[in-house]
Amino acid sequence: MKTVTIDASGLHYTPLNQEIRQAVKNGAGEIIIQHVMGQRFIADGLAGNVTIRIEGVPGGDLGMFMNGPTCIVFGNCDHAPGNTMDAGRIVIHGSAGDAVAHSMRGGEIYVRDDIGYRGGIHMKQYLEKRPTLVVGGTTRAFLGEYMAGGLILVLGRTSTRPIRERGVGSGIHGGKIVIRGDLDERYLGVGARKLPLEKDDMAEIYPLIRNYAAFFDIDPEPFMDDSFIQVVPSSSRPFAGKYTWE
Amino acid sequence: MTIGSVPSKFRVSVNHDQCMLCGRCIENCPYGVFRMENNQIHINSRQCVACHRCIAMCPRDAIDIKERPVDYRSHPVWTPEVREAIYNQARTGRIILAGMGNAVDYPIIFDRLVLDACQVTNPSIDPLREPMELRTYIGKKPSRIEFEKMNGDIELKTALVPNLQLETPIMIGHMSYGAISLNAQQSLARAVKETGTFMGTGEGGLHESLYPYQDQMIVQVASGRFGVDINYLERGAAVEIKIGQGAKPGIGGHLPGEKVCADVSCTRMIPEGSDAISPAPHHDIYSIEDLKQLVRSLKEATQWKKPVFVKIAAVHNSAAIAAGIARSSADAVVIDGFRGGTGAAPKVFRDHVGIPIEAAIASVDAKLRSQGIRNEVSLIASGGIRESADVAKVIALGADAVYIGTAALVAMGCRVCGTCYRGLCPWGIATQRPDLVARLDPETAGKNVANLINAWTLELSELMGAAGINSIESLRGNRDRLRGYLLDEAIMKVLDVKPVGA
């Protein structure tokens, strides 16, 4: 496999992305970007079968509109990695900012630690495209707001009640949020309801837990037998009943 | 029975002496007004929305429709509309949704502005004999250009950014597949291709059958991000970020699950029958800096090859907002006035929120000029452009081009009945029901829309010629060619026009 190394120090995001695109065009299977310091839009709109190893802290909208590649970040991420992403994978060895996986339509995001506000906002699914966001630690408020499809999994490595902020699943009308341990009812958002995750449904999250454990070199076993809850829509038509016709 | 039933909005009658019992009215009315009983057409007037499909199809002119056959006691304050809205909400306790654009009788500024013509001194120009330049470029223009002279040739040294080239300053605004039918979109696509202009996709994705027209399509990215992927962005000639809409400033959109059929679900990329909810804000825009980030993310994704437009509703502070947008790397700002149409909007927003396009465009143009950044963006005026005179006037107030919406639908047969939200449009425009959609033939309807654009373009060149102007650029922002007729002084100050006689 051909590996290309790019030194991003002092490089603006446009020439950086041009170098990435050129490397992909030249058949690179792996791209290592060193000294990343806040460059936005890395791999924006990028297609192809390539793994991009990002050393440093990328700026906002990492992998926006991305369709296929894998980005592995060795550091934290700014806001909205995976914004409107189509396919591919983002693995973050650290934490990420607000609106992670915003409007994501396909692919996977794994965050080792925590994420900010409005994670997984308006994720949606269609046919075989079902986006997944896995968070190892905790999240801030309004997780899965407006969620229309896909799966969010919060593992809460350090707590059995990993989310202690309000608005979880506010306006959710599709998809589900799976949380290890429990969630206080008072943290549920408008239109969301909490159900236990039955044993049959666990099968769906086992591969995600195994992936998470493998990516970050963590023992999966403590998660496998633990209990989980799920937050799902109380209705697929949250705004039906709000309007009348003239 | 506290409130009881309110009077029927329309009364339909059939002249049985004229009627030949052909049954076309029954076939054509999807609302169920007509039925055949005992060899006679019977009528349920309460179902009528005045779409006029029956009237258009009756071979004998036997049908008559009268509006408000039973009126209330007349009262200037407690109009029938006000009373009926109260009855409706007293029954339901809900927000009233309504179709089409603003239905309140606000004065129309366009109709209080008159255009100029030459007499004796600087002579008028005859467009029949002399070339009229209506070609319009939408996008950033450099503030200065540098040349290099090489052996008698001149080489441009300034790098230009992509612009859209329009053969006429009239484009068709964003009406999504879902809000309108695929045949309607195909008709519009044929029209813009024929006339050398552009149309918007709306937030409904780009159906495969429109790929042959993709070079004329402006693809929209709105808060729901429906149908948006890199393929969609790369196909469009330009990308438009929709922040707001004139018909409902400040709120999002909501395509009810009933309208999300298999094909609509496919282009929007959401499950069939699910509600498509476009939230009020974009989840990644909470400031002008965030907007800049979205603009640049779209440019970066498309490798800076496509102009990016930002559309906002015309509201009180449009000028300051547009000045912010002009600094965001956007190439054009679309201002959508409060007369802009829609398939469905809360009535209270449609009728009461936002400002007229005339005032908004004039103030945005003035603000950008005062800041020396008018060249940074093109201005597209939209919302309530009804005729070529409106196009001329709004360009004279500072716009580069216009978007038309309702006018293009009317060119395809729409009667402005305002019942788009029912999804039963008998003209095959605002519906997804296959038998109704099939009524609209894209070839014929496309020709009709192209005719309208061509006719307006002809009128525009005549108006310009009469004013002694041979290039659209000389009309743009040329307020001296406008005079206000019975407009108040404050409005004329905003528009920067003089009164008639001055």
Image (cartoon, coloured by chain):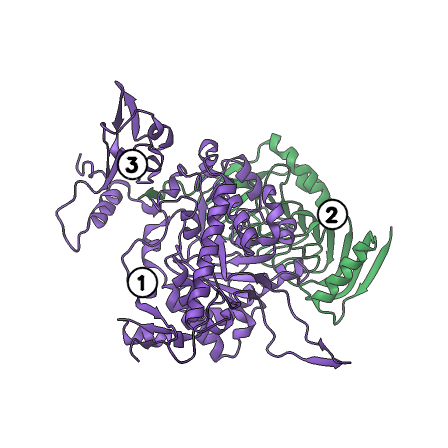
Chain colours: A green, B purple
Residue B103 x %, y %: 30, 53
Q: Chain of mark 2?
A: A
Q: Which residue is mark 3?
A: B48
Q: Which residue is mark 1?
A: B108
Q: Give residue B67's quadrant in the image.
A: top left
* Residue sitting nearer the eye, B292 or B216: B216
Going by the numbered disc 2, the residue's amino acid type is Ile
Depth check, mark 2 against mark 3: the one in front is 3
Seen from this angle, which residue lies furthest right?
A: A1
User: Can you tell which mark lies on residue A197?
Assistant: none
Q: Chain of mark 1?
A: B
Q: CA distance from mark 2 to mark 3?
A: 67 Å
Q: CA distance from mark 3 to mark 1?
A: 29 Å
Q: Is residue A152 above or below residue B196?
A: above
Going by the numbered disc 3, the residue's amino acid type is Cys
* Residue sitting nearer the eye, A216 or B177: B177
The quadrant in which the C terminus of chain A is found is top left
Q: Which residue is mark 2?
A: A218
Can residue A207 be seen by looking at this rendering?
yes
Which secondary structure, mark 1?
Answer: loop
Q: Chain of mark 3?
A: B
Can residue A181 be seen by looking at this rendering?
no
Q: Give residue B335's quadrant in the image.
A: bottom left
